[in-house]
């Protein structure tokens, strides 16, 4: 096949369509797309003798689709109808309006992130969240880092490098995504001393290990794992008192770390940050984007002298929180200070929604769609908190031919809809769908249902 009829890059660039592409995507990228398109045509044509040469319009349309593909964002908002409130794969906690506004205000221009407005001199980025965390928890000091894994790593690196750290075998958990507490502990250079048996740990196990010089006793939340049956672990207070008797630091990795009492919402009791401090923890760390309902962050609070050492460690600089995180976090913390968390923080609105309210929304969805059944089901909290616990909920259930195909179709909608299946039915839980997403969810659902119908009776 003769390729001489194929237009050159220069010829294509002279067209009106190319000017439009350059205006939208810039010259270098448009050039790349045109070259890629021409290369592809040459490759195809060289393979087949019957191929006809595409005209300019077809070539530029092809270049336009490449440009669209190359510049489409890969990180997209989705509608979470799965009923898992803190879904790590779906970005954990949605932020409150105030948190979003605070990020917006701070990121559009400059801010006093590290600038003291009173003195006109350099300030500390740490004070913004620290002041609120002190007020909220009564802790002497606080530092905010990139995430809770970084907080654990930082505590151990700063306070226990090359020294012994005692941890119960029942708490050597993997929390998902391959993150294992013992791996992080070793990474810090601490010498891990495991005590007790997987299911049963006694205070005497700790006491025995404490007879040798030790830097720290570490307590870690079981996260997404639950022990039942013949189990025993000493209370935080007992371990803290014992550690202190030996002059050893007691650090508590709470994982999710809630400030509100989960039992008030019909869930099991999740240890609170306040309780951990009251039990005698010298340091407490927890995530910003689990039950706190804020941005990704690791929050570390506790004794001022320990936090002073931690803040000075080089790793503290490497894992520090950025201004967007601090803006969203401080706005989130303010909701707790003003006792409006349940109303303003999306995950607490979801947790506190009554089955009756959820049912009304599921019924509204069914009425709008003109199909589906309302079934009693369960929502889960997720995010490594409250394993095995669930909230009674109501879901919209759709009977479809192939649930896998249907789920796939839902994921192709804009925005994608994430649902779950049970016994070949599609279940959609209103609890985790933000109220303002109802409209677009119904449009997307109707689209997918319609496309199924078309396939059945073409
Ligand atoms: C979730 C969790 C972490 C990690 O927190 P990230 O903020 O995701 O880094 C650490 N420890 C425990 C017990 C957890 O549950």
Image: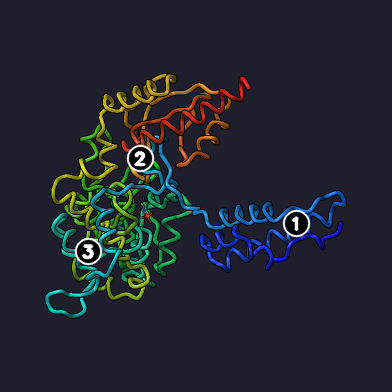
Ligand 1 within 8 Å of the CB at mark 1? no
Judging by the rendered image, the residue that carries numbered circle 1 is: 41
Q: Residues within 10 Å of mark 1 (few under 14, many from 20)?
A: some
- Residue at 81% x, 55% y is 45
Q: Earlier in the sequence, mark 1 or mark 2?
A: 1
Judging by the rendered image, the residue that carries numbered circle 3 is: 142
Q: How is the image coloured?
A: rainbow
- In the figure, is residue 215 to the left or right of 370? left
Judging by the rendered image, the residue that carries numbered circle 2 is: 85
Find the distance from the CA under tag 3 to the CA under tag 1: 61 Å
The mark lying in front, picked from 1 and 2, is 1
| Relative height, residue 143 to residue 117 (above, below) | above
Q: Earlier in the sequence, mark 3 or mark 1?
A: 1
- In the figure, is residue 189 to the left or right of 454? left
Residue 380 quadrant: top left
Q: Are marks 1 and 2 in contact (CB under 8 Å)?
A: no
Q: Secondary structure at mark 2?
A: strand
Q: Secondary structure at mark 1?
A: helix
The mark lying in front, picked from 3 and 2, is 2
- Residue at 31% x, 46% y is 233
Near-viewer residue (369 or 136): 369
């Amino acid at each position: 096949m003769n390729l001489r009829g194929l237009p050159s890059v220069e010829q294509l660039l002279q067209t009106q369509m190319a000017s439009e592409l350059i205006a939208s995507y810039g010259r270098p990228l448009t050039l790349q797309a045109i070259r890629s398109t021409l290369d592809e045509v040459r490759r195809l044509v060289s393979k087949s003798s019957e191929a006809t040469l595409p005209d300019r319009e077809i070539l530029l349309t092809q270049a336009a689709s490449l440009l669209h593909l190359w510049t489409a964002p890969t990180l997209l908002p989705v509608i979470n109808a799965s009923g898992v409130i803190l879904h790590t794969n779906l970005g954990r906690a949605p932020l409150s309006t105030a948190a979003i506004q605070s990020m917006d205000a701070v990121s559009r221009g400059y801010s006093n992130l590290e600038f003291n407005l009173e003195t006109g001199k350099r300030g500390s980025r740490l004070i913004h969240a620290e002041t609120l965390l002190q007020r909220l928890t009564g802790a002497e000091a606080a530092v905010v880092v990139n995430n809770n894994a970084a907080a654990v790593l930082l505590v151990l690196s700063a306070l226990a490098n090359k020294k012994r750290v005692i941890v119960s075998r029942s708490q050597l958990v993997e929390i998902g995504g391959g993150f294992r507490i013992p791996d992080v502990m070793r990474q810090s250079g601490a010498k891990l001393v495991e005590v007790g048996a997987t299911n049963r740990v006694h205070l005497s196990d700790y006491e025995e290990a404490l007879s040798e010089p030790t830097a720290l006793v570490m307590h870690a939340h079981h996260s997404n794992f639950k022990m039942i049956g013949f189990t025993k672990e000493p209370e935080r207070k007992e371990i803290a008192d014992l550690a202190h008797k030996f002059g050893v630091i007691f650090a508590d990795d709470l994982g999710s770390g809630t400030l509100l009492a989960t039992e008030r919402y019909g869930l099991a009791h999740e240890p609170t940050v306040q309780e951990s401090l009251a039990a005698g923890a010298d340091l407490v760390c927890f995530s910003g984007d689990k039950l706190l309902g804020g941005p990704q962050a690791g929050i570390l609070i506790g004794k001022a002298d320990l936090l002073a050492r931690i803040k000075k460690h080089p790793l503290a600089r490497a894992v520090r929180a950025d201004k967007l995180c601090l803006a969203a976090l401080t706005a989130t913390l303010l909701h707790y200070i003003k006792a409006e968390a349940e109303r303003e923080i999306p995950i607490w609105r979801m947790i506190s929604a009554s089955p009756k309210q959820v049912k009304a929304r599921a019924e509204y969805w069914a009425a709008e769609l003109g199909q589906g059944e309302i079934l009693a089901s369960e929502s889960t909290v997720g995010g490594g908190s409250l394993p095995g616990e669930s909230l009674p909920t109501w879901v919209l259930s759709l009977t479809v031919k192939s649930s896998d195909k249907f789920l796939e179709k839902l994921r192709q909608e804009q925005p994608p809809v994430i649902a779950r299946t049970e016994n070949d039915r599609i279940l959609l839980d209103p609890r985790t769908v933000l109220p303002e997403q109802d409209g677009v969810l119904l449009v997307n659902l109707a689209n997918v249902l319609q496309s199924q119908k078309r396939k059945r009776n073409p």
